[in-house]
Amino acid sequence: MIAIVDYKTGNVGSLVNMLKKIGINSVVSSDPKEIEGADKIIFPGVGAFDNGMNNLLASGLIPLLEKKVKNQSTPILGVCLGMQLLAKGSEEGVVPGLGWIDGLVKKFHFEDRNLKIPHMGWNTIDVKKTDPIFNEMAKEARFYFVHSYHFVCDEKENVLATTDYGYDFESIIRKDNIWGVQFHPEKSHKFGKQLLKNFIYSC
């Protein structure tokens, strides 16, 4: 079973629909029993870092997620804010993050004043390491981004791909059974569909 963690941070309908297109039934849930029974977990999110962490704390799910991810090695995919919450913290707020992947979330700072924040729209990735998440991925793969902050890994071996927007930032990260993507695969058409398919079947 694929569990999409519901911690009140945005509409996940498009993610459910994209999974249906690849033949995967998922459950959107904050029910500990459903998350406990999950074979894979997707950790979505949109909005501000502190709001996301406070919602997650209020849900009471963190101990269970720690057990599933850290102790039982259940694969988890963090999407957008869900990726950022994997960090130790963010410039956007003061609430500590989960700290599952060493790093901090920082705001875009550009010398080129013509670049707008947020980074919004389609962009490509530059793959740094081989990984099952890239299986059968077209070289011209591009994904849909909407964000003002980005993950900065302390350990660069956790960086699977970067994206150029003013400078290179980490757009796909991985540590053991934990993956994170800064973009929205559920809004990225065939490329996002392939990435989700890879996470479900290959990771």
Image (tube, rainbow, N blue to C red):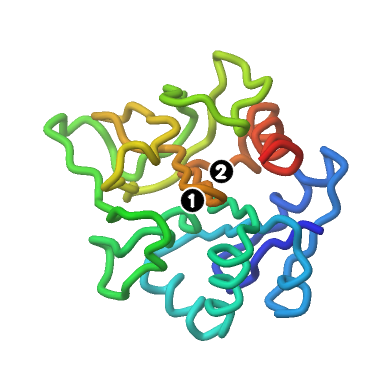
Query: Residue 139, image x and y in percent?
Result: 56, 14
- Callout 2: SS: loop
In the rendered image, the residue lying farthest to the left is 111
Q: Earlier in the sequence, mark 2 or mark 1?
A: 1
Query: Residue 96, image x and y in percent?
Result: 32, 72
Find residue 90 and report its image quarter. Answer: bottom left
Lateral position of residue 109 relative to residue 21, left or right: left
Q: What kind of residue is marked 1?
A: Cys
Lateral position of residue 176 relative to residue 19, left or right: left
Instruction: State the residue position of label 2.
Output: 184
- What's the residue at 47%, 39% (across, down)? 145
Instruction: State the residue position of label 1.
Output: 80
Q: Name the quarter where the N terminus is drawn.
A: bottom right
Q: Residues within 10 Å of mark 2 (few under 14, many from 20)?
A: many
Dot 2 and dot 1 residues touching (CB under 8 Å): yes
> In the figure, 130 relative to 42: above or below?
above
- What's the residue at 48%, 81% (across, down)? 57
- What's the residue at 56%, 30% (across, down)? 131
Number of the label disc, if any, that sits on residue 110: none
Q: Residues within 10 Å of mark 1 (few under 14, many from 20)?
A: many
